[in-house]
Amino acid sequence: MATKRDIPDTATAPSNWAFGPLLLLALLLEVPLGLWGLTTDTHLAGPFAVHAIICLALFLLTVLQHHQTITRIPRGRFDPIGMLVLACLGPAGALGLLMSAGLLWINRGSEEKNREWFEDLSLIGVQHDTNDLYQKIINNRTRPLGNNNLKSFDEILAHGKMDEKQAMLGVIALKYHPSFLPFLQKALKDPEAAIRIQAAAVSTKLHTDIKSRMERLLKSRHNSPSVDQIRTTVDDYSRLIHSGLLEEHQKIQLMQSLKLFLAEHASDPQAAFLKSGIEPASWDNDLLRSQTEARSIGKFDLTDDNASKSDKPLNDVPPNSPSGNNG
Amino acid sequence: MALMENKKNKQKSVLVRRSHQRAADEAGDPKIAKWHAIANKDAKADICLIVEGCYPFVRGGVSTWLDWLMRNQPDLTFSVFAIFPFSDFRKAHYEVPDNLVSFHQLGLQDLGKESSFGHKIDNKSVKQLHEEMTTDLLNLFDVGGLEDFSRLNAAIQDPASGIPKSGFMNSPFAWHLINSLYERKMPQASFLHFFWAARVLLGGMFAIMQSDIPRADLYHTISTGYAGLLAARAKLEMKNPVLISEHGIYSNERRIEILMADWIADTVDTGLSLQDKRFDLRDLWLRAFDSYGRTCYQACDEITTLFEGNQRIQEYLGAPTDRMHVIANGIKFENFSSLEKQEGHPPTIALVGRVVPIKDIKTFLRAVSIARKSIDDLSALIMGPTDEDEDYFEECRLLVGELDLESCLTFTGNVKLTDYFPQTDLIVLSSLSEAQPLVLLEAGAAAIPCIATDVGSCREIIEGRSDETPAIGAGGIVTGLVDAVSIARAIVELLTDSEKRIALGKTLQTRVDRYYRSEQSAQNYKALYARHGITSAQSDPIGDPREQDR
């Protein structure tokens, strides 16, 4: 999370309104005068003379103010120069300038708004993939390159220490993918009792997770879903069917439900296309990825309608709450 | 002398009963009143049992064992120190044993009211205490043990430190402590997550450190974790013997829970790397419970468990091997050995257990389906309650239909085993996890051979312990987990060879008779206490602990 000191520039420029009242007065004089000069047949020399005098006065004041400002504030900007140029354009420029001043006056009290606007644009202090990545890189929390080789699981099961095998089972539990199943089955036959116990616990957790997701999917109702929603739902079905964790009758139940869903919500060509997409490849997405990890990369699991509802605060389920020693 | 002691014990027992009766008269329900009568009573016991998350408010194997332990040591007095998340007095599921003289309860998350301790963190002595405690905590959570815990405990107990007896975790000092740990251990992580994790972990530990230890001559904990920390404190402060008897291995159970926990935020993206050593919140939880376990093991004079397999895990978690030995649980042998076998029934196998995922009933069903191809008239029973996980039961029923087993498989529900054992040829256990399944012992006592997965003490019960002398032989067949084919093969092998089946049944009966009798188990605990100076007038002579285990 970025802090204020990370903000590269200030949200609002320093303002100097000492010159303001004079400029305002000049503009208030010039606009009606100019408009009067343009709408009557009166000789224009008068209004233009007044205009020239006002411009000269403004110019002198501006030079004086400019000098004072830049000597007091290093890198200070002097906005009235721009305003003076506009004022010199005559009554139309003065009118535009007056309107700008009016807008500035209307927004005079919204410094906080300006800061928010600035922070929104700069994406600092908000949850965003870009910021997450930036923070992960500077804090050394990013995924290491070259360590995603599944072969290392085989190596660990054959020759690894107990804590390595336990960590592997932790990964299988939290980041499940069907290709992990053979490793889980091997772990169930590990010579170490502690590993067999953990493998059994992982197996139970995965089956429970997949079952509850299946139930949610079967119970979900869709009223006129968008194409994206249809695709997401079909993806969910696909991942469950190819999870490797369901019984045959459960797969059949899901396939029947999917057929009904497609018949209700997808046109024939769409349905055919979507059916062809039901393959294990959709497991490349993060079906059973831990919710907290998904959140940490700014994504929620789309298969889980109740993800946010079921997220409990840390102190709700501490493992120190004695979970029982009842064998 | 012995007579005097005996008289004293009897008087003590009478007094305890009278005290219980008085309280019962005062309150409505005599069962509840008895618990209230001994709650927080300042009565010294021979043995203080330290329990976490079970007795007397939660039913289960360990709670039942605790009740059995007290009732089977009638000459000794006990107190119970029960640790729960909160200290609300709930309905007790067990009656107060006559020799239970006091009951104490601690809520780990009862953190007390606000405290101003440490408000002036710049104060020299407070600052020094803060520095020392931060270092000790970091060491403890790194690879620390009893030594680091001892220093922390000394600071908490020292009246000069000014640490309040209640509300410590709600003090500015605790806030600064958590801040310092965060900055030194994992400043890259989310402070919010770290704060709550540290508050729960430290809150529990400080609650243990700030509780009053009941007076007793010996402290007996049934797990590591927070119960183990209290036992370690008793060792440090009361200077009395401390024992641990684990059924499941607490630290390992916590490890498994933490490694699979979705609610712990992973702040480091390790992908699938298992060699990544960057410290994360999950490591904090793991190391905390590992260090609690090491602290307890280092403090204990003897470390017992139910079977050898657990000892390897205890050793891995830091238990000194020279203090470890096994005391198995036992059964009433005669209740089952006297059952007469019935003839003229079809080949019958039974699984005894609750219909829940951990028992892996589905693998059993698949095994039955495979075995039935070889044994036409096979009959299979599933004996146990089906209402604990109704969804799972429904899935099992669907699988029965899918495998076409309706005609040969019966869910009997909860039944009396002695009614069914006479017509059962084989007991099958397909569990994913067990400690010491009593059903194998009960089947063994009835001379029924068993097929069981390689979990808990199943292998030890069926094949015997590694140091069994003389070796008795196998009393059944051990299979892999989730392996329907192996289970089916074993079923067919034993049901088609009645000579072998009967021989295995006899072998198992011999083993149960020799090593797994309830009286023998009670005697072993009596011997364990006696080795540490806790004897009653009727004590028998005590021999070598490893002999006593048998």
Image (cartoon, grey):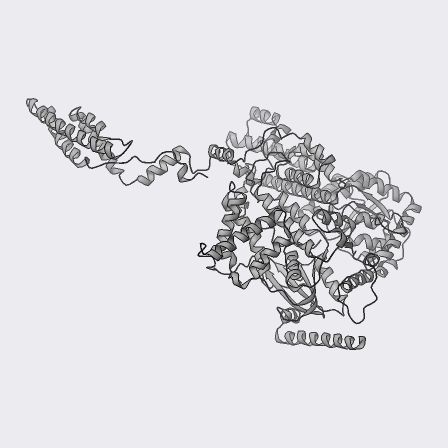
* Residue lying at 86% horizontally and 38% vertically, measured from the top left: B374
> In the rendered picture of this protein, how many numbered marks are placed on residues?
0
Q: Is A82 on the left or on the right of B70, as rendered?
A: left
**Does B423 sit above or below residue B92?**
above
* Quadrant that contains the C terminus of chain B: bottom right
In this view of the protein, can residue B305 be seen by the observer? no
* Quadrant that contains the N terminus of chain B: bottom right
Of A123 and B20, nearer the camera is: A123
**How far across and how far down the image is residue B48, in percent?**
68, 64
**Does B456 sit above or below residue A56?**
below
In this view of the protein, can residue B296 be seen by the observer? yes
Of A63 and B10, nearer the camera is: A63
**How far across and how far down the image is residue B311, in percent?**
75, 50
* Residue lying at 86% horizontally and 43% vertically, measured from the top left: B377
* Residue lying at 71% horizontally and 39% vertically, measured from the top left: A161
**Does A37 sit above or below residue A185?**
above
**How far across and how far down the image is residue B395, in percent?**
69, 43
Q: Is B433 on the left or on the right of B24, as rendered?
A: right
Q: Is A103 on the left or on the right of B507, as rendered?
A: left
**How far across and how far down the image is residue B364, in percent?**
77, 43
* Residue lying at 81% horizontally and 52% vertically, measured from the top left: B440
Residue B14 location, quadrant: bottom right
